Image: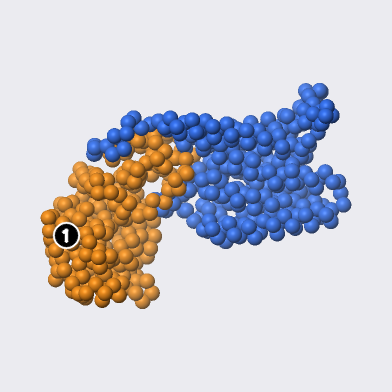
Chain colours: A blue, B orange
Amino acid sequence: MISSVDDVFNFSDYGALIALLHNSIIAGALLGLIGGLIGVFVMMRDLSFAVHGISELSFAGASLALLIGVDVVAGSVVGSLAAALIFGALGVRARERSSIIGVLMPFGLGLGVLFLSLYKGRAANKFGLLTGQIVSIDDPGLIWLSVVSVVVLAALAVLWRPLMFATVDPEIAAARGVPVRLLSPVFMIVLGLTVAMSVKTIGALLVLALLVTPAAAAMRVTVSMLWVPVLSVVFATVSMVGGIMLALGGRLPISPYITTISFAIYLGCRLVGRIRARRGWAARPSPEHRTPALTA
Amino acid sequence: MTTPTAPLTPALELAGASLAHGHRVLWRDLDLRVAPGEFIAVLGANGSGKTSMLRAILGEQELTSGTVRVAGRVVRRGSRQVGYVPQRIAIDPVTPIRARDLVRLGVDGHRWGTGIVGVARARRRVQELLESVGASAFGDAPVSQLSGGELQRVRIAEALAGDPALLLCDEPLAALDLAQAQTVVSLLDARRRERGTALLFVTHDINAVLGAADRVLYLASGRFRLGAPDEVLTSAGLSELYGAPVDVFHTQGRVIVVAATDPGAAQHDPHIPEHVLTGEPS
């Protein structure tokens, strides 16, 4: 019993471990930042299932890279982008998209399992792709992540307003000259890059904990266009960095810590949201304002 | 507000405009000059090309022939001179967005960037717009909690954000009850009188706009009639337009359009609108 608790939490020599694994903590913070921001659009554009599908194909790409001995992150990025572009191009309507994802996802997962079973290297590498690995972030890995994060942040900085307009109110956005149809595949590419980066750290099976849960939690407690992304980033970063810090003290994979923190935040936000909904969302002084006299 | 005055550039000018989908002609040789501040009601059955006309004016659909000019300029996509209130309220009810945020998107949502620069000015503009449609009381409410009438007013504010010369409204009253519909119409009527915004207002329900509209454009069977409501909405006029006998009754300030022949025959004619078939004031 005691030894299994030791597996989960063991904080002797903690300072030395943090110094050793500061790469992972930086990686966690970067992923929290881009994952939290992308998650807002994932929720608003109803792409949760697509994220799951992209991560499985990203896993297939990474497994193939591992098998043929090329850079795993590169393989993961290629798999991700291929999936994102296929989903973006073939599935314009939500229903259509779901069926395409449902078809491609098991195929990708199957390919990944095939590649991994052919791979003769370290078993930890195999398992890490599915459930994440704390020690997997070496210096080249961190450089990859930093470069991709800068690309994703720059893309979001440029696209933010028109993407939000196209997401919320596509018809008026199109009338105002927003290239609504072009933005869709462009966003899928940015999403694909983010998923590829997340797969390496928290694993293909658990990417949703980073790209969906924090944004979903934020939307439970606020409806402000400013506060949803801010809270989503805070929740994602707390889950990632907090999960890594806790994982340092045990011998388990990183993912359960991240997913548990992420889920706990979500539960907390649901509770707060429910209390808020019962009190009313404010900003409505009194019921007669529902049909106020014309003031224009 | 009745006739275009010569020195003013028309808010909208359609010249020799025709639109066909394949062999089916929706309307042809349409000449329409809309003066600033003029209120034009566009009537006609489903499929008579009303929404297509709006799409052509937005630059999203090419005319088969003819030209569209808005405020003197050949139309192009994304023009600030055209505001648009679409038929479908496409906003997902779970979208976490306040009324104020929606109007903000109308103000600068089409620009690249995050919008953090210039946020103070945008906020003031949003407040002005909310006040101009009487929506400041629920500016901070989530869009999902607005009533149909409230949401429609917020969307009008969103469409007016660019201070357009012409506002296109596609069935903005469709989901509203009578009181809400009246509020929206008088709001738009006040806007065009005070600010000179021309209105092209597509509707099924002529009675909702009868007091406000200067002219009526009635589309049917590939043809159209254009003129003052009293001139267009006559038994003779609409019978000619439909190529079938149609009766128009004026009663208690309302107009009722009914098919004069037996309803069974009329039902096979796809061009005759619902309110003609049912005889009900739709």
Query: Is residue A68 shown above or below B236?
Result: above
Judged left or right of residue B76, residue B237 is left
Judged left or right of residue B227, residue A156 is right
Residue pictured at 16% horizontal, 52% vertical = B211
Residue pictured at 65% horizontal, 46% vertical = A195
Find disc 1 in the rendering and name its residue: B255
Judged left or right of residue A245, residue B189 is left
Q: Can residue B36 be seen in this view?
A: no
Few, some or many residues within 10 Å of mark 1 (<14, 14–19, 20+): many
Query: Is residue B154 shown above or below A265?
Result: below
Residue B84 location (% of width, % of height): 34, 52
Residue B198 location (% of width, % of height): 24, 51
Q: Nearer the viewer, residue A156 or B172?
A: B172
Total labels drawn: 1
**For numbered disc 1, what is the local secondary structure?**
strand
Q: Nearer the viewer, residue A56 or B181?
A: B181
Residue pictured at 35% horizontal, 35% vertical = B138
Residue A57 location (% of width, % of height): 69, 54
Residue pictured at 45% horizontal, 48% vertical = B92
Q: Nearer the viewer, residue A144 or A1?
A: A1
Dividing the picture into quadrants, the one containing residue A98 is bottom right
Residue A246 location (% of width, % of height): 73, 29
Q: Can residue A10 be seen in this view?
A: yes
Q: What residue type is labelled 1?
A: Val
